[in-house]
Image: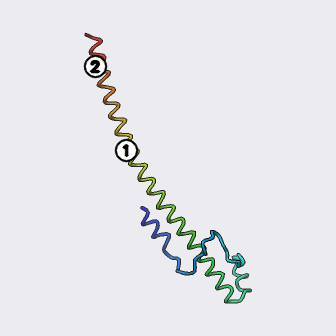
Amino acid sequence: GSSSLASLLGGGVGTGATTDGEEGSFHGSTASGSGADLAKMGSAEASEDQVTMLGIVQAQRDRFVQRIQDMEHEKEQLGRKHASQRQALQQLQRDNLKLYEKIRYLQVQ
């Protein structure tokens, strides 16, 4: 369920800085992704950009984990509602059959 998927998504990503609440905020850094661009930058600036990107990716992961958990909860609720509606339908079908049998009996009389 949600715990196995959440643990799968949570694994393999180290801890680091997080975003300041703005989705997709790059904190004014450049969004270059190639190794050659990072090699050209100073090591401190490259490290800062990596930490910033790590924070963005972690925040996105956390949002997706929460969204998955919410959707799985909704799925469970809908499953219970579906089972309840199916039981109600079956009861109505039994009631209809009994009424039909009574009507047929009264017509024969």
> How far across and how far down the image is residue 70, in percent?
48, 59
Q: What residue is pinned by disc 1? A: 83
Residue at 38 percent of width and 48 percent of height: 80
Q: Secondary structure at mark 2?
A: helix
Residue at 34 percent of width and 26 percent of height: 96
Residue positioned most to the bottom:
43
Q: Which mark is residue 11?
A: none
Placement of 73 over or under 85, stated as above or below:
below
Q: What residue is pinned by disc 2? A: 102
Colour pattern of the rendering: rainbow
> How far across and how far down the image is residue 106, in percent?
27, 14
> How far across and how far down the image is residue 59, in percent?
56, 71
6 and 81: which is toward the camera: 81
Mark 2 or mark 1: whose residue is earlier in sequence: 1
Residue 90 is left or right of residue 10, and the answer is: left
The kind of residue tagged 2 is Lys
Residue at 58 percent of width and 77 percent of height: 18
Q: CA distance from mark 2 to mark 1?
A: 29 Å
**Neighbourhood count class around disc 1 (C-alpha, 10 Å): few under 14, some 14–19, many 20 upward:** few
Placement of 57 over or under 92, stated as above or below:
below
**Neighbourhood count class around disc 2 (C-alpha, 10 Å): few under 14, some 14–19, many 20 upward:** few
The kind of residue tagged 1 is Ala
Q: Which image quadrant for residue 94?
A: top left
Residue at 67 percent of width and 85 percent of height: 46
Residue positioned most to the front:
21
Quadrant of the drawing holding the N terminus: bottom left
Q: Secondary structure at mark 1?
A: helix
Q: Which image quadrant for residue 26?
A: bottom right
Placement of 104 over or under 1, stated as above or below:
above
